[in-house]
Image (cartoon, coloured by chain):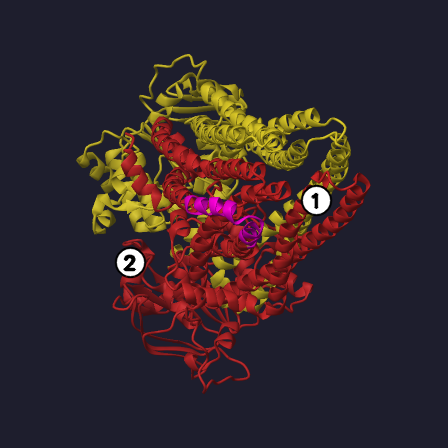
Amino acid sequence: MKWSKYVRPYWKYFVLGPLCMIVEVLGEVLMPLWYSRILNIGVENHDVGFIALTCLLMILTALLMMGGGVGGAWFGSKAAVNFAADLRRDVYAKVQQFSFANIDKYSTGSLVTRLTNDVTQLMNFVNMLLRMFLRAPGMMIGALIAAIALNAELARVLAVTIPVIALVEFLIIRVGFPRFTAMQQRMDHLNSTIQESLTNIRVVKSFVREKHEDEKFARANQDLKDAAMRALGVVIFMLPMMMLLMNLTSVAVIWFGGRHVIAGDMPLGDFNAFITYITQILVSLMMMSMLFMNSSRALASSKRIREVMEEKLDLSDAGAAHKDARVARGDVEFKHVTFRYYKNSENAVLRDVSLTINGGETVGIIGSTGCGKTTLVSMIPRLYDVDEGQVLVDGIDVRDYSLYHLREGVGMVLQKNVLFSGTIAENLRWGDENATDAEMIAAAKSAQADGFIRGFADGYDRELEQGGVNVSGGQRQRLCIARALLKHPKILILDDSTSAVDTATEAAIRESFKNELRDSTKIIIAQRITSVMEADKIIVMDDGAITGIGTHDELLKSNTAYQEIYHSQVDGKEAA
Amino acid sequence: MARSLENLQKQYNSAASAGAMGGGPGRGPNFGPGRGPGRGPGSGRGPMAATNSFQGKPADTKGTIVRIFSYVGKYWKRLILVLLCMLLSTAGSLAGGYLLRPIVNHIADAATPAAERVAYLGGMLGVLVGVYLIGIGGTYLQSRLMIGVSRTAIQNIRDDLFTKLERLPLKFHDNQTTGELMSRFTNDVDNIGLMLDQSLMSMFSGIINIIGTLTMMVITNIWLTLITLVFIPLFIFSSRFIIGKSRKYYAAQQAALGAANGYIEESVAGQKVVKVFNHEADCVEEFGLLNGDLRMKQMKAMFFGGIMGPIMGNMSQVSYALTAGIGGALCALGRFDVGGLAIFVNYSRQFARPINEISQQVATLFSALAGAERVFAVMDKDPEAPDPEDVQRPERLRGHVVLDDVSFGYVPGRTVLKHISLYARPGQKIAFVGSTGAGKTTITNLLNRFYDIDSGRITIDDIDIQKLPRDFLRQNIAMVLQDTHLFTGTVMENIRYGRLDATDAEVVAAAKMASADSFIRRLSDGYNTVIEGDGANLSQGQRQLLNIARAAISHAPILVLDEATSSVDTRTERHIERGMDRLMQDRTTFVIAHRLSTVRNANAIMVLENGEIIERGSHDDLLAMKGRYYELYTGKSELT
């Protein structure tokens, strides 16, 4: 990725910011010079007029410096904020382009951190860079030149002090950095301990383990305190140490400089100015070390952002042959499909799967957890690409559709159901943003959701909270189904989407599918055998392969795995 | 169909994440733990938005201060030492500055012989080094001592808060999100820490510094001091103005940031749904609106946060220029000495710094006090009621449980359970069947007094459970809860949570009973496999088995299984049936299950509806009754 993309549109700010800061730096170097002239010329010659004039000049310089500083802040924040906002926009857009495989690679938390913390981190760094990058070295160089110009011999003191200070700073950073990292880790540990105890509060209470948790927490807390003391110890040490070095430097300057003054080869004004310059040099040295510390953090952030931006999208419809094709009938065919999540892994999740589903059929898929049911159906809307073989929809390879048209035609209710902040109506209209109220209500009715929605005081205008936590699990699943129904998909896939719905409601949902989705292909993954019993076709899966296809009665006769599942669930009823 | 900006802000602002990013005024790269990025999990979502913690002024400032002081007060001896060190360090730096005056005056004094002047210079520099060393020593000791006090105080506050949280009734926890409580620890306690570490000290030393510097100025030259005094109100006024502005824009920025972050979190978490619905373009558009809004507000916030330094710093440059000019003129007229001017100029240049610092710390101070108030509010909540005076503690419980006309509601006026009466003899198995929300889980939560009943009576072995010590009661009821929660630690440790003194062999036996042994052995390190993040590396079914093992290891005579095997697939469930039977043997067991097949062999089955028992009896009785249970079982009607 090119960072310059985020700089170029705002290059004026990126130039003007540092320029303004240079005004401030120049002023800072000039001020002691004016002052020394007051002493050397004004006081020496008792020339009050000259002093007054120089004083005015100094005030003017100070005002200019203020202008420079404010301007620097203005351009600096413009540059940094625009840089960050553009970057944030692009990173977000990039994440939107991610395929499922790309998404799987990152945890949600890590993507969110990159979009929030890391971008902010970079923004602050750019701002600091623009305001300090030229300033600290600029001030140092300016003060150094001025000091050498004033008295080159005396400036040699710096040849000793600067390396010593740099060395001390280096050592402190080297000792301090790991200690701060350690402290941060302990902090994270403490936080996760708290979080765990709070989410598990019922377990803690039911086993009467409050004291046990207290002790665990106290240990983590003590660890954190120890680590904090160690880390802060460095800071506590650093500040006085720096002060000491600075003071010793000025003592040395006063000693050598004072002797020059006494010897008469250095004017008093120069002596005073020299001391000021020394302080400036040392302060800018400290500023630079801070800059250095911060840049290592920003570097880490930029790496994490770069990782997202440079993530290779492994799924694209750029080369699709039938971009205009739309899903019309809903036929699905798998031809010798093999798939692995981890491409270098030996175990394939799907192994040589072949299968034909005709448009309008109802197909049930059953099998124990981890056998590849979800993976199998994920191939249809091309959430992942097959490694070998082919998936065809209406006789066209899914890779030849435009992703948009393919996914418009395939409605899928994921196992992990998510709703979004906003009203119920807004959520349902994800399926079809132009749906009329009547259409929306019809979809909700089919998903058996209309009843409970009307039970809410504000009905379809009820605000859902993030993730839809303010409706029950079963209600959430039904809303998700309604949302998918509103799409009027040619192929509807339900991935274990009614597990929290009561069996009667589930039966009603199945019934409405039969009536209202007569022409659509319905593929249902389920745990309960009753959910798939009436399907036209039931697919039994085990360990990435299909072990049986047929109707309920056929499988009950021929397929042992199916028999086992059936008996584990229905035996009791038979006996009754 | 993208929503409007206004709408988005409304929807995502309430979920604004507090303190997710730093970068406001008064938050320099100073010390203080966890200020930076990645401050641990759950970065404090919840209604306590950053705007709140920044602006919120405490209601009872005095009481809060007194209470914070009670944490540091016991170290009063050390605090006095801190104050002394602070005086020493300020005195050191002021005296060090002042010593320059005689030095400059002497070396510039052409009347004295050169050798004498050099000797004087050497002597004075010796003194100067001494003064510097004393001052720096003071500075070091002061921070060292204060850090010790403040970190210990923070540690104690954290301990107290945590201990309290563990003892608050579930009613409290039901109404608080974990994120909200986490932000008490992360934001609020951190702010108190920051205040104790830094703000208080820099305010005190700032005040001492101002007084000291002013005194030195007056001593040096009263007329020049007057010039500086003219600048003081100007300093205060402009810093107040800037802080007020930047606080306002900072709050606006935090709100916009909260909305943008909320949106990011939600849409990224639901990224797969976004893709399945072809919703990417809408998301980009909506995010663009929020991002644009953030851009405008962030710019202002950053600008006002950034001009404090240059304006205040250069204002003192103006006062420096004025003193240099007027002082120089006085020197030229012979009314002032050059050495005096040298130090005065230094003083006047440094003068803005403490004022600047104090005004910045005021903001930190207020947000710390507001945070402290929220922390103390939690600490002041009533814990679970203490055991009564006439508590009864039998040797052991057999598990004869009786509910007599029990009614209960989570919220007053909304009864969830109505007139429930039932009994279970020791060793019997009672099952609850009913729709979600019928009150099945609630009944079990009353048994171990997670909640106290409103009317009626619950007895175990004929003792009212209100009269049993609460800890004893809970130790006698082993629960397998609906939500499977595990702790970070090994599998062994997680099972042992049920009985801390269980041997390894007993843990394995319990795992076997729960049919967990075989999958545990297949884990990378067997029983020593570390479970992280609530067992994310285990399947839901496996977690349920571990939960059962955890309950199996306890010797409790009463067992509650709340949908304990709902995520175990039916084939596996069959395999573990025998283990479960052994587990329930000799224990009074309450079972809640969705699958009717799992409750068939119960001694009694209670069919619950709307908080009432509408049918009860054995499986055969209920079938013969041809009522609701019969309908459910035969599929004529199903659970709703």
| Residue matched to label 2 | B631
Quadrant of the rendered structure where residue B78 is? bottom right
Using the image, name the chain to which the residue with label 1 belongs: B
Residue positioned 44% across, 50% down in the render: B363
- In terms of secondary structure, what is the magenta stretch mainly? helix
Give the Cα distance between marks 2 and 1: 105 Å
In terms of secondary structure, where does tag 2 sit?
helix
**How many discs appear?**
2
Mark 1: which amino acid?
Answer: Ile
Q: Residue furthest left?
A: A438
**Which chain does red denote in the image?**
B
| Residue matched to label 1 | B103
Classed neighbour count for the residue bearing mark 1: other residues with Cα under 10 Å, few (<14), some (14–19), many (≥20): many
Quadrant of the rendered structure where residue A423 is? top left
Task: Give the residues in magenta.
Answer: B212-234
- Mark 2 or mark 1: whose residue is earlier in sequence: 1
Q: Of tags 2 and 1, which is closer to the observer?
A: 1
The quarter of the picture where the C terminus of chain B appears is bottom left
Q: Where does residue A255 sit, x and y in percent of width and height?
A: 76, 40
Classed neighbour count for the residue bearing mark 2: other residues with Cα under 10 Å, few (<14), some (14–19), many (≥20): some
Determine if the magenta segment contains residue B223.
Answer: yes
Q: Is residue B94 left or right of residue B35?
A: right
Mark 2: which amino acid?
Answer: Glu
Residue positioned 29% across, 48% down in the render: A505
Using the image, name the chain to which the residue with label 2 belongs: B
Q: Where does residue B367 sit, x and y in percent of width and height?
A: 44, 53
Q: Is residue A95 left or right of residue B453?
A: right
